[in-house]
Image (cartoon, helix red, strand yellow):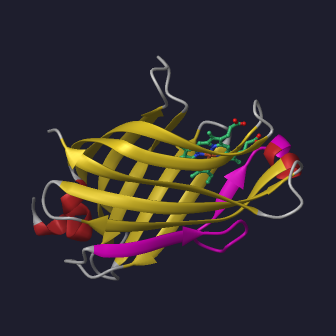
């Protein structure tokens, strides 16, 4: 794909990964649980989007995760990845349909094969929004994701969402990781 997408060029396409692993507090089990998952993701290029002198190229993405042989996904996201070549800024703006929005950001070289994005609530640029229930009972206190590009046909992510939850005395590191393989 063209240079305009910088390090995001490698993520364009259709992807699947069978080896996902989620660590979260399960309300039905009343404990922190590790859950393997299957993921299917689609990343579609667009651009440019111009903000005055700023020119962004991006990927429109959606992803979904299934556990066991359940029919409905147990987690989904929709959003955009963005690249600003002038500043080396990479952004990921997405919604988790629990009532959470994240704009995570970081910097990377145009040919980077690894980069990290983060967000914290109340941050002036890369921030997290959540609904009132979550703010009171299961609040996200930070988000970080590390992307590793493993050649043309695979990439991985490791993400950590720190949560302050009613059920737990200590902060919970709600983590997810997977390797995605090109299927289109
Ligand atoms: C691959 C990505 C993710 C997966 C597979 C996933 C999955 C899960 C699961 C299984 C639970 C436990 C639900 C339950 O049994 O009660 C959960 C809880 C939660 N997740 Fe995630 N999650 C992911 C990413 C995220 C991200 C990126 C955020 C926020 C930035 C987030 C925020 C939360 C919150 C706030 C809860 C607690 C909800 C509550 O207790 O009421 N998750 N997630």
Residue depicted at x 40% and y 51%:
80
Q: Quadrant of ligand 1?
A: top right
> Is residue 127 found inside the magenta-colored segment of the image?
yes
Evaluate whether residue 57 shows in this view.
yes
In percent of width and height, residue 88 lies at 33, 80
Residue at 26% x, 63% y: name it: 8
Magenta extent: 114-133
| Position of residue 75 in the picture relative to residue 12 (left or right) | right
Q: Is residue 132 above or below residue 163?
A: above
> Quadrant of the image for the C terminus?
top left
> Could you say which quadrant of the image residue 112 lies in?
bottom left
Where's residue 132, x and y in %? Answer: 83, 44
- Residue depicted at 69% across the width and 54% down the height: 129
Visible residue check, residue 55: no
Q: Is residue 164 magenta?
A: no
Q: Residue extending furthest top?
A: 71
Q: Nearer the viewer, residue 130 or 19?
A: 19
Q: Position of residue 84 (x, y in %)?
A: 32, 72
Q: Residue at x 42, y 46 (%)?
A: 20
Query: Looking at this view, is 110 or 15 the one in front?
Result: 15
Q: Quadrant of residue 163?
A: bottom right
Residue 127, quarter of the rendered image = bottom right
The mark tally for this picture is: 0
Farthest residue, direction left: 1
Q: Position of residue 176 (x, y in %)?
A: 51, 53
Q: Is residue 63 above or below residue 8?
A: above
Between 67 and 126, the one lying in front of the other is 67
Quarter of the picture holding the N terminus: bottom left
């Amino acid at each position: 794909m063209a240079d305009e997408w910088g390090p995001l060029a490698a993520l364009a396409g259709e992807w699947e990964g069978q080896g996902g692993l989620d660590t979260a507090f399960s309300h039905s089990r009343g404990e922190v649980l590790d859950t393997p998952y299957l993921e299917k993701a689609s990343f579609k290029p667009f651009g440019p989007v111009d903000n005055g002198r700023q020119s962004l190229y991006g990927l429109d993405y959606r992803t979904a995760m299934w556990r066991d042989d359940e029919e409905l996904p147990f987690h989904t996201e929709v959003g955009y990845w963005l690249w600003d070549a002038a500043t080396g800024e990479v952004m990921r703006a997405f919604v988790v349909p629990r009532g959470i929005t994240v704009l995570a950001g970081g910097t990377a070289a145009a040919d980077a094969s690894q980069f990290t994005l983060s967000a914290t609530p109340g941050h002036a640029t890369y921030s997290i929004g959540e609904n009132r229930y979550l703010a009171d009972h299961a609040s996200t206190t930070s988000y970080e994701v590390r992307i590793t590009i493993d050649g043309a046909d695979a990439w991985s992510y490791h993400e950590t969402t720190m949560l302050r939850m009613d059920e737990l005395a200590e902060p919970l590191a709600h983590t997810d990781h997977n390797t995605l393989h090109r299927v289109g």
